[in-house]
Image (spheres, rainbow, N blue to C red):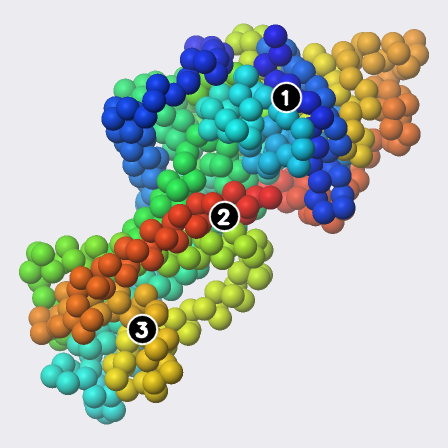
């Protein structure tokens, strides 16, 4: 049974249709990647599924709850790591986790243990009492993932989790995401425009182009459908007619650069 | 780490029907999350308290320069009260106003950093996020209160040290900070950018301050300004502070009306801003 499903999900901003009739179903334990260029509609999908943005039309259910009518219930069972660097640099790593543990109703008697476990799981125990502004980019991202899974959510949304990270830091984040899936069976929906990330992490891919899903399947099945020697880049070009490149408007570029700058 | 996927059954979490226990649990949860948002601010201040010191400069200048000069010139008639006494509660109100009215920009900053997105995705009621921010402003406002009290005492202002009066001042500062910070958040939700907010913040702050009884009595104002002044919540804040803070202070409009205006305005603004709050990220 799908833990996340959408039916004809659509979001318009004035005359622009950012997400157009999106219908997907993701089973428990899958890592589904939304692959697309900047402006393809990936972040808008995540914003609707995390209740940040109401859809213009269509429906979406997460863990059986409708994202509009049962938004409060959806919020209890999801974790979210936004594209922007969202850890509070003026607090320590432990304090960042503690604050969110309280917001997620983790009982007071369990707070310290849960925060300690999360720091350990993300390999941050040694730096838990340091201010986050002194962390490296990879450490910040791992802390943010720890924040997102503190309350043991059924579904975790990662919006371009490795944008702005160097290759080593990127790999450390991938390892933790992979661990979430293999060890705990967490369902993960992530957006990316990184082919390598999509191939490494995703058990399933949906390629988005101008607000629509133009292809959907496992990495292997998508490649096979294009040709015997096809790469993921070939698959992307085949379905969208464009190369994957860092594109998008002024806002996207500014945001990406800001994230990269903050992650060092 | 034992990270298990929580069962996600709508039926399991179906409401059992608004029982007293549910309402109590919801109220405790609301209070806990409101306090958490305020605690976050307290922790930030603990790590870096320099802002509190720099912010103290403005009330110090008003009291030490403006207050001293106008006390000597006796240009503003303040009845039995020396001008410096009359002015001290106004400067406390001004400090709270200036801290709270720019709180919206902190929310825009949190939005730009992505912190606000995570708050909004958490199961925290919007009203708790808004009230928590208001109380964060109150926390900063209270630190200004301590500084203004210290300066006023050094300048010979006749202060009322009765514990009940101090509790009253504390309540007035908290209510006013919540009110103006919430107003600021509402504006931030509408204008959404730092640049626009800074412009509007400047436009709002000075009229609020000068169209109040903070540094001169309402009786000295032209009629049209008196009418505006009576619609300005800052007037009621200053009136309450003047009655509670000074040994010979008295309320012009009555403490009951002062608190009623502050509570009703703050509650109305929290209700409106809670609805507007998610718009800041869209």
- Badge 3 is on which residue? B230
List x then y, in percent, for residue A110. Answer: 32, 19
Q: Secondary structure at mark 2?
A: helix
Numbered disc in front, either 3 or 1: 3
Cα separation, mark 2 vs mark 3, equals 27 Å
Q: Residues within 10 Å of mark 2 (few under 14, many from 20)?
A: some
In the foreground, B11 or A13: B11
| Circles 2 and 1 in contact, beta carbons < 8 Å | no
- Badge 2 is on which residue? B276
Q: Are marks 2 and 3 on the same chain?
A: yes
Q: Is residue B167 visible?
A: yes
Q: Secondary structure at mark 1?
A: strand
In the foreground, A211 or A120: A211
Q: Secondary structure at mark 3?
A: helix
In the foreground, B73 or A1: A1
Q: Residues within 10 Å of mark 1 (few under 14, many from 20)?
A: many
Q: Quadrant of residue A104?
A: top left
Q: Are marks 3 and 1 on the same chain?
A: no
| Circles 3 and 1 in contact, beta carbons < 8 Å | no
- Badge 1 is on which residue? A189
Q: Quadrant of residue A167?
A: top right
Name the residue rendered at 34%, 87% in the picture. B222
Q: Going by the image, does B19 lie left or right of A155? A: left
Q: Quadrant of residue A35?
A: top right
Subunit bearing disc 2 = B
List x then y, in percent, for residue A210. Answer: 80, 34
Q: Residue furthest toward the left?
A: B162
Name the residue rendered at 65%, 39% in the picture. A260
Subunit bearing disc 1 = A
Q: Going by the image, does A183 lie left or right of B217? A: right
The N terminus of chain A sits in image quarter: top right
The C terminus of chain A sits in image quarter: top right
């Amino acid at each position: 049974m799908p833990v996340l499903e959408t039916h004809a999900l659509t979001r318009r901003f004035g005359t622009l249709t950012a997400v157009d009739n999106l219908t997907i179903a993701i089973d428990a334990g899958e890592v589904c990647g939304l692959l697309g260029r900047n402006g393809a509609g990936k972040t808008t999908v995540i914003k609707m599924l995390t209740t940040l943005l109401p859809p213009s039309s269509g429906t979406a259910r997460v863990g059986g709850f409708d994202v509009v009518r049962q938004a409060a219930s959806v919020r209890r069972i999801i974790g979210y790591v936004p594209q922007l660097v969202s850890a509070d640099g003026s607090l320590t790593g432990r304090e960042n986790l503690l604050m969110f543990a309280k917001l997620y109703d983790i009982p007071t008697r369990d707070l310290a243990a849960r925060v300690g476990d999360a720091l350990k799981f993300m390999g941050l125990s040694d730096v838990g009492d340091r201010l986050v502004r002194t962390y490296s980019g990879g450490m910040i991202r791992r802390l943010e993932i720890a924040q997102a899974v503190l309350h043991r959510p059924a579904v975790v949304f990662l919006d371009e989790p490795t944008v702005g990270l160097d290759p080593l830091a990127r790999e450390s984040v991938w390892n933790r995401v992979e661990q979430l899936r293999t060890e705990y069976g967490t369902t993960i929906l992530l957006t990316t425009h990184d082919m390598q990330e999509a191939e490494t992490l995703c058990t399933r891919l949906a390629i988005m182009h101008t607000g629509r899903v133009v292809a959907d399947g496992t990495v292997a099945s998508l490649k096979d459908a294009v040709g015997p020697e096809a790469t993921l880049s070939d698959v992307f070009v085949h379905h969208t007619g464009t190369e994957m490149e860092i594109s998008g408007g002024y806002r996207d570029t500014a945001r990406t650069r800001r994230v990269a700058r903050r992650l060092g | 780490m034992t990270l298990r996927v929580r069962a996600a059954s709508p039926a399991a979490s179906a409401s059992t029907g608004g029982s007293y226990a549910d309402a109590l649990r919801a109220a405790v949860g609301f209070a806990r999350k409101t306090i958490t948002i305020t605690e976050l601010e307290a922790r930030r201040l603990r790590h870096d308290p320099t802002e509190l010191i720099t912010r103290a400069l403005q009330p110090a200048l008003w009291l030490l320069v403006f207050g001293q000069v106008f006390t000597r010139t006796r240009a503003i008639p303040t009845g039995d009260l020396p001008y410096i006494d009359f002015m001290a509660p106004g400067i406390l109100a001004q400090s709270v106003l200036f801290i709270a009215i720019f709180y919206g920009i902190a929310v825009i900053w949190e939005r730009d950093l992505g912190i606000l997105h995570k708050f909004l995705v958490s199961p925290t009621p919007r009203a708790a996020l808004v009230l928590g921010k208001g109380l964060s402003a109150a926390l900063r406002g209270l630190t200004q209160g301590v500084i203004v009290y210290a300066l006023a005492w050094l300048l010979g202002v006749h202060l009322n040290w009765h514990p009940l009066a101090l509790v009253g001042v504390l309540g007035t500062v908290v209510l006013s900070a919540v009110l103006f910070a919430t107003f600021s958040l509402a504006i931030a939700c509408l204008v959404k950018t730092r640049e626009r907010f800074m412009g509007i913040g400047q436009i709002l702050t000075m009229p609020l301050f000068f169209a109040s009884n903070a540094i001169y009595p309402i009786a000295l104002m032209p009629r049209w300004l008196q009418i505006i002044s009576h619609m300005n919540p800052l007037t009621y804040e200053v009136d309450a502070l003047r009655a509670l803070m000074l040994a010979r202070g008295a309320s012009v409009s009555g403490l009951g009306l002062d608190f009623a205006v502050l509570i009703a305005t703050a509650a109305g603004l929290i209700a409106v801003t809670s609805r507007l709050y998610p718009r800041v990220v869209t």
